[in-house]
């Protein structure tokens, strides 16, 4: 079928108007799942790719102060979009493109390096949050905020304050990746697959995190029933080394390859999946604890086993920790609270 030459010269006629009976600009802009990722550095892009491979978004928007970077990353991924369920992928510095997003993932900020002073990192990233969080919330006032930037517990608290969102709609990635790493190292030592092991790390995403050895199981069999000293100093098999390895993981990867992003990308996409598809999975993410029995009434964000669904944090698990685990939990909570004190005035 060929179009007569005369028609092609007519400005109202072109290949598209001939091919399609209704033109794209006339399509009804119906249901879309828009996910926004603020920060298109290593972590933002890793999260974006993981979200796209799971086909969770019909529209993915990368926002970055470095607009060329955001655009180039969006374009680079778009070239393979035909194999990702044909999502629309945009790179921009314009926050209005966050309009009506379902989830906004915040990954902005300086990549933490092994040498960086933690209080300087907090101050730098908090200043960025003060600028960025209100802009995101203006255009996506009903979204769930997923905080990845470090230090994640304190910045999740800051994001809750700066957004004015109810706490259940601000979720920190917290120790989710730590739990996955813990599960992986235990599985490696046992010589079985990671998905056969249930294991979690709670509290601070940092050195005072708490491995819940009392609840490490394989098919419901508690390792503590086999080795009563597991994870303690008295343990003849030194299982406790695995938690030290979890804490050291970020530094180890950064010193070997300059950054880390893939594990975090996969974990963050799992949380986005739980929100978008309301799967109500149980994961250790950072949540607001005021009034919660674990938190000693402290006003902090800290990781605990939470059920995540369409509303963000749907509910928490009541876990029967051992007295030792409870004590470590309280210490970790106090540590976050003490560090957080330095920023409280600036959030009033
Ligand atoms: N806890 C974890 O396991 C874990 C893992 C990975 C990353 N992270 C954290 O994620 C964050 C990002 O890490 P990364 O490796 O992607 O860093 P990166 O430096 O590669 O990317 C950060 C991006 O943020 C952008 N940015 C900075 N200021 C901005 C602003 N005001 N507005 C918009 N964009 C801005 C930068 O242009 C850059 O593209 C860090 O805080 C890092 O510690 C944590």
Image (cartoon, helix red, strand yellow):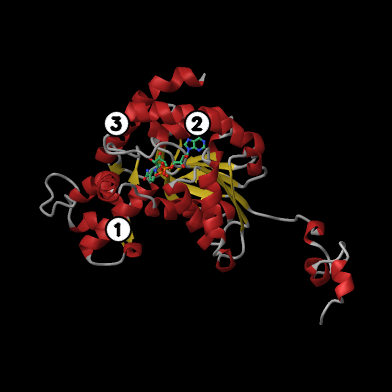
- What residue lies at 62% left-to-right and 39% top-to-bottom? 94
Task: Find numbered disc 2 in the image and state the secondary structure of the residue it sits on.
Answer: helix
Q: Earlier in the sequence, mark 3 or mark 1?
A: 1
- Residue 184 numbered mark, or none: 1
- Residue 331 numbered mark, or none: 3
In front: 216, or 166?
Answer: 166
Q: List the residue tagged with mark 2.
A: 129
In front: 330, or 283?
Answer: 283
Cα separation, mark 3 vs mark 1, equals 26 Å
Cα separation, mark 3 vs mark 2, equals 27 Å
**Label 1 environment density (alpha carbons within 10 Å; few <14, some 14–19, many ≥20):** many
Judge left or right: residue 99 versus residue 259.
Answer: right
Can residue 334 be seen from the camera position used here? no
Task: Give the quarter the ligand 1 occupies.
Answer: top left
Q: Earlier in the sequence, mark 3 or mark 2?
A: 2
Q: What x and y, as percent, mark residue 256?
A: 25, 50
Disc 3 residue lies near ligand 1 with CB under 8 A: no
Q: What x and y, as percent, mark residue 275?
A: 56, 51
Relative to 289, residue 13 above or below:
below
Judge left or right: residue 264 versus residue 29.
Answer: left
């Amino acid at each position: 079928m060929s179009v007569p030459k005369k028609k092609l010269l007519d400005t109202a006629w072109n290949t598209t108007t001939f091919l399609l009976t209704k033109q794209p600009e006339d399509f009804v802009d119906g249901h879309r799942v828009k996910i926004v990722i603020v920060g298109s550095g290593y972590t933002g892009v890793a999260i974006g790719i993981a979200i796209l491979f799971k086909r969770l978004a019909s529209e993915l928007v990368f926002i970055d102060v470095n607009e060329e970077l955001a655009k180039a990353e969006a374009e680079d991924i778009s070239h393979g979009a035909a194999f990702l369920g044909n999502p629309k992928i945009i790179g921009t510095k314009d926050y209005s493109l966050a309009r009506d997003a379902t989830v906004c993932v915040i990954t902005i900020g300086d990549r933490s390096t092994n040498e960086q002073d933690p209080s300087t990192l907090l101050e730098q990233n908090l200043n960025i949050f003060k600028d960025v969080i209100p802009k995101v919330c203006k255009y996506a006032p009903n979204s769930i905020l997923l905080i990845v930037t470090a230090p994640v517990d304190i910045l999740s608290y800051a994001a809750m304050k700066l957004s004015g969102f109810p706490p259940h709609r601000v979720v920190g990635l917290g120790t989710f990746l730590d739990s996955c790493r813990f599960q992986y190292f235990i599985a490696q030592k046992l010589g079985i697959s990671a998905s056969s092991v249930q294991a979690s790390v709670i509290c601070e995403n940092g050195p005072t995190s708490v491995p819940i050895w009392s609840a490490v199981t394989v098919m419901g069999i508690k390792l503590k029933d086999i080795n009563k000293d597991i994870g303690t100093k008295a343990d003849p098999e030194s299982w406790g080394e695995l938690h030290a390895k979890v804490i050291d993981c970020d530094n180890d990867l950064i010193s070997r390859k300059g950054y880390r992003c893939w594990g975090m990308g996969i974990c963050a996409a799992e949380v986005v999946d739980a929100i978008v598809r309301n799967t109500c999975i149980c994961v250790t993410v950072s949540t607001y604890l005021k009034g919660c029995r674990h938190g000693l009434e402290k006003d902090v964000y800290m990781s605990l086993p939470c059920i995540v669904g369409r509303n963000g944090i749907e509910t928490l698990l009541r876990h029967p920790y051992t007295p030792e685990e409870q004590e470590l939990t309280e210490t970790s909570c106090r540590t976050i609270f003490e560090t957080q004190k330095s920023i409280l005035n600036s959030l009033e």
